[in-house]
Structure formats: structure tokens, C-alpha cells
Image (cartoon, rainbow, N blue to C red):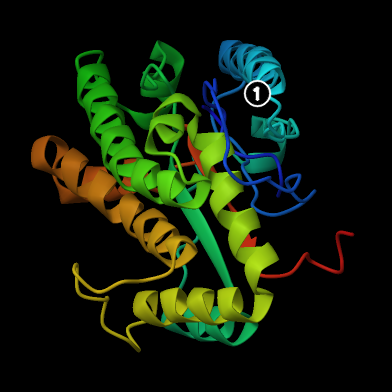
């Protein structure tokens, strides 16, 4: 779904559903944010087409839920696609530092940046390869890295989604965008202060102030989700490094040329964007 991937449209993905045990609140207008990065031109057209497909899929999902007398899943709000004019060609993203994570922990917010989630894994165009200085055969390396990233994220997202929705089968049929909305909205609705504490712990883990929770230790779904999201960019970079080497892997993983889902999750709506 070109584009969570998490202000308040969420990741572009295919969503179809059957029944929901609990009602979902509409996705907030600004959080979580999914802003797809990518090349302009044909890539912008591809992102717009993917968004149209998602809207169509969500309409079908809502039709089925309506037949069952269930609440609808909120559709993501399309976000403008960034272009080279406002991104800067080939520029890398600024990585969060320890002081940044300290500030996020105090604010109870978590920014994220993960490779685009799509039903069919993202594959770079020749134009994108040229801008990254890569050979045509490197397209397979990037496509495989996106595929592995998507599989990792969905393997963690689906169980959390099933837990929140109360129906594991529904989590398999609803796309990543709707699943993330369900997890974030559920935590915010249940207890915003508790959610804020969970997000603060995620920031402390990323800032090196707290060790990651043990695999068997129970954590809040939104906390587990954001731990997975904030760790995925490093896993994606490691997959690239295995073939392209650490320097190129870091340059490529942090580049704005490729497709990614990025945004900020917070326990309460941003008062500056209401």
C-alpha cells in the first residue's frame, strides 16, 4: 500500500473484510501519517492508482460489513505525493538522534519510516535505479528486500490486528492500512494516557534508555506495533547490505528516491493540525 504506511491517511494496501466484533472509530485526520516517498512521473501515477485501488477495496469491505450489520472500516485520506521539487533529488532522510528520541519520549510520540507496504512488493523503476547509481540487476535486490520487509511487518501486524478486532480471520482479510488504524484508534479510545506511556517506552528503547521488552513479555498492541515499525528500517538496510554492502545499503535505505511509509503516531491529536 504505497502509502501507512502510518498524518492521517494510512498505508496504501488492499483491504477487504468480513465482520468486526467491536466498532472502530474513524481514523484521525492527522495521525498516524502515511506519506509515500518515491520518484515523480510514472511513479506518482502508480501511487495514485494504488490509492484508487485501496479506496475501491475498502468500499467493497464496507459493503460486506454492512451486509453483516457491522461498523465500517474508516478509509484512509489520500495524501499528496511528494515530488522532486519539494524533496530534493537524491537527498537522504535525517535520522533521529538520541536527543530526538529523548524529546519524543517526553512528548509521548513515535515517528516511523518503513518501506512501502503493498500487496505486490514495490519494485524500483529504471529511473529510480539511475538516480541511485545502481545497475539494472540491482532491481531484483531491492524488490526482494521490499518483499522481505513486507512479510516481516505483516507477520507482526496481523496478530496485533486480530487481537484488537477480536477476529484473527478478519485480520487476514483487512489490509495493513485498516489494521493500523484499528490498533491506533483502539489504544487512543481505550486510554490516551496509557497509550502515551506506551509510546514513551518505544521512544526510550530507540534512544537507548530502555532495553527492548522480552519476546514473551506482554506489551500493549500499539507498543508492539511501533517497536516493529521503528526497527524495520534497520532490518531493511541489513537485507540490502548482504548484497550491496553496508555503505550503499545505508545510502539507499535512507534515500527519498524509493518508496516508504512515514509519519508520527501520538496518543492525542496534534493541536496544531486540528
Q: Position of residue 80 (x, y in %)?
A: 75, 32
**10 Å neighbourhood of mark 1: few (<14), some, or many (≥20)?**
some
- Measured as percent of width and height from the top left, residue 193 is found at 64, 81
The x, y position of residue 146, in whole percent, is: 31, 31
Q: Quadrant of the C terminus?
A: bottom right
| Secondary structure under the numbered disc 1 in the rendered image | helix
Label 1 belongs to which residue? 65
Outermost residue toward the front in this view: 69
In the drawing, does residue 114 fall left or right of residue 40? left
For this rendering, which residue is in front, 199 or 84? 199
Where is 100 relative to 235, above or below?
A: below
Inspect this view and state whether residue 262 appears. no
Determine the residue positioned at 51% across, 27% down.
1
For the point 49% across and 35% down, which residue is it? 176
Q: Nearer the viewer, residue 38 or 263?
A: 263
Residue 269 spot, x, y in % from top left: 78, 64
- Determine the image quadrant of residue 168: top left
Q: Is residue 226 above or below residue 87?
A: below
At x 37% / y 31%, what residue is drawn? Answer: 132
| Residue plotted at (36% across, 71% down) | 219
Amino acid at each position: 500500500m504505497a502509502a501507512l504506511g502510518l498524518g492521517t491517511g494510512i498505508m496504501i494496501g488492499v483491504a477487504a473484510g468480513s465482520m468486526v466484533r467491536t466498532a472502530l472509530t474513524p481514523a484521525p485526520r492527522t495521525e498516524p501519517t502515511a506519506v509515500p516517498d518515491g520518484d515523480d512521473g510514472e511513479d506518482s501515477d502508480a501511487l495514485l492508482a494504488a490509492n484508487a485501488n485501496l479506496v475501491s477495496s475498502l468500499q467493497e469491505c464496507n459493503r460486506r460489513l454492512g451486509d453483516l450489520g457491522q461498523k465500517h472500516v474508516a478509509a484512509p485520506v489520500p495524501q499528496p505525493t511528494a515530488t522532486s521539487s519539494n524533496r530534493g533529488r537524491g537527498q537522504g532522510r535525517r535520522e533521529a538522534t538520541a536527543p530526538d528520541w529523548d524529546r519524543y519520549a517526553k512528548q509521548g510520540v513515535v515517528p516511523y519510516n518503513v518501506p512501502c507496504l503493498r500487496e505486490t512488493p514495490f519494485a524500483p523503476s529504471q529511473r529510480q535505479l539511475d538516480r541511485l547509481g545502481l545497475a539494472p540487476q540491482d532491481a531484483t535486490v531491492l524488490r526482494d528486500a521490499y518483499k522481505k520487509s513486507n512479510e516481516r511487518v505483516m507477520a507482526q501486524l496481523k496478530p496485533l490486528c486480530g487481537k484488537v478486532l477480536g477476529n484473527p480471520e478478519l485480520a487476514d482479510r483487512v489490509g495493513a492500512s485498516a489494521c493500523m488504524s484499528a490498533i491506533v484508534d483502539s489504544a487512543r479510545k481505550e486510554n490516551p494516557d496509557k497509550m502515551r506511556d506506551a509510546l514513551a517506552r518505544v521512544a526510550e528503547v530507540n534512544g537507548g534508555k530502555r532495553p527492548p521488552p522480552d519476546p514473551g513479555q506482554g506489551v500493549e498492541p500499539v507498543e508492539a506495533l511501533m517497536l516493529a515499525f521503528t526497527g524495520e528500517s534497520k532490518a531493511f538496510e541489513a537485507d540490502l547490505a548482504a548484497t550491496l554492502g553496508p555503505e550503499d545499503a545505508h545510502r539507499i535505505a535512507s534515500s527519498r528516491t524509493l518508496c516508504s511509509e512515514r509519519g508520527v503516531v501520538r496518543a492525542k491529536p496534534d493541536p496544531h493540525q486540528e
